[in-house]
Amino acid sequence: MSANIKDDTAVGAVKKNQGPLVSDDFFYSTFETSFDDKVDIVSLHLDDLLPDESGAVVLFAGECNEILLEAGELLVSSGVASSHVTASGVDVTGLNVYSFASGLTLYSEGEITIQTGM
């Protein structure tokens, strides 16, 4: 079977005006098309973050980036920060705040998906 064969059916759907297949859209699936190159996922581990002297970390990842944080400890609380400036001088008022059992406090512009081992 040649990689350049056109097929108008994919998972019961018909896609019109198909060109030659390319490796990035081989299956022509709706799922693949809707998530293809639109959202960048940034994956971090809690141990990789360097807090300031008060135990705070501030992440500015931009609006279009999704953050996945792997944490080997318990998430104690989360919410939105009230009026606060970190020890390093960053105003985190209104940012999402996540507090961990180790005492580390994480602030971010957008929501973070946190995967704990607990």
Image: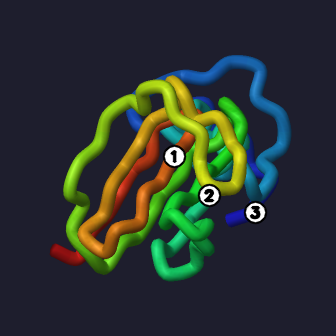
- What is the C-alpha distance between the residues marked 3 and 1? 51 Å
Residue of label 2: 42
Disc 1: which residue: 107
Q: Residue at x 76, y 60 (%)?
A: 3
| Visual colour scheme | rainbow
The amino acid pointed to by label 2 is Val
Q: Residues within 10 Å of mark 1 (few under 14, many from 20)?
A: many
Mark closer to the chain start, 2 or 1 = 2
Q: Is residue 3 left or right of residue 92?
A: right
At which x and y percent is residue 59? 63, 50
Asked if residue 101 is positioned above or below residue 82 in the image, the reply reads below
Q: Secondary structure at mark 2?
A: strand
- Local crowd size for mark 3, using a 10 Å CA cut-off: few (<14), some (14–19), many (≥20): few
Can you tell which of label 2 and label 1 is closer to the viewer? 1
What kind of element bears circle 3? loop
Q: Position of residue 113 (x, y in %)?
A: 39, 50
- Residue 34: image location, x then y, percent: 57, 31
Residue where numbered disc 3 is placed: 2
Which residue occupies 62% across, 55% down? 87
